[in-house]
Amino acid sequence: MNRNISRFALCLLAFLVGAMVALGSEPLHSEVKQIDFYSLNPDTRLKLFTETRVIELVITNPIAGEAVARVSQDGATFGLPRNVILMGATRGQQQGALSLIEMGVIRTGLKLELGLRNRMAENRLLTQPLNRIELSNNPGSVH
């Protein structure tokens, strides 16, 4: 009987160690080249890195492109949260004053166009080109 308990304890220990390794090996953040924000879940957290800023986004309504944004100059201290409307990836204004937007997409190498109060052209803002996009796998916190 003691032998059976020992075997069971060893099997249970092996299972628990395996589960800890499997669960612990998933990174808190995964780096992506592009993301379709319409397909994200509410409360998904993103970090967008430009040359001079880090932008934290918490997706609140992916279908409408709504998010809460906070901006940091140093990547550690972030400003107050602000509601934004995500438009999509763009190179910015081209010849003839046209600005083509890939709606619903955030992509490295391109700027992100945001609406500050609504989608009206006068309320839009462009980020600098994005160097990196991090998708958080931990919705409870932003790192």
Image (cartoon, rainbow, N blue to C red):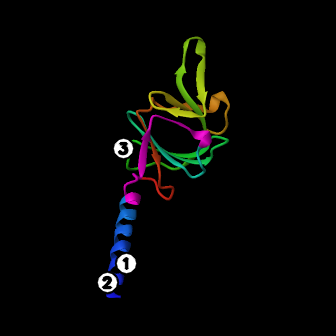
Mark 2 or mark 3, earlier in chain: 2
- Circle 1 sits on which residue? 8
Q: Judge left or right: residue 117 versus residue 139.
A: right
Residue 47 lies in the magenta-colored region: no
**Distance between mark 2 and mark 1 Cα atoms:** 9 Å
**Residue 43 x %, y %:** 57, 52
Highlighted range, magenta: 22-39
Q: Position of residue 109 (x, y in %)?
A: 44, 27
Q: In the image, which disc is placed on residue 31?
A: none
Q: Amino acid at mark 2?
A: Arg
Q: CA distance from mark 3 to mark 1?
A: 52 Å
Q: Secondary structure at mark 2?
A: helix
Packing grade of label 1 (10 A; few <14, some 14-19, many >=20) is few
Badge 1 element: helix
- Name the residue rendered at 39%, 58% in the picture: 22
Contact between labelled residues 1 and 3, with CB atoms less than 8 Å apart: no
Residue at point 59%, 25% (across, down): 101
Q: Nearer the viewer, residue 29 or 111?
A: 29
Left or right: 107, with 5 as reference point: right
Give the residue at x 59% y 49%: 41
| Residue 43 visible at all | yes
For residue 3, the mark is 2
- Three-letter code, disc 3: Asp
Q: Quadrant of the N terminus?
A: bottom left
Dot 3 corresponds to which residue?
Answer: 74
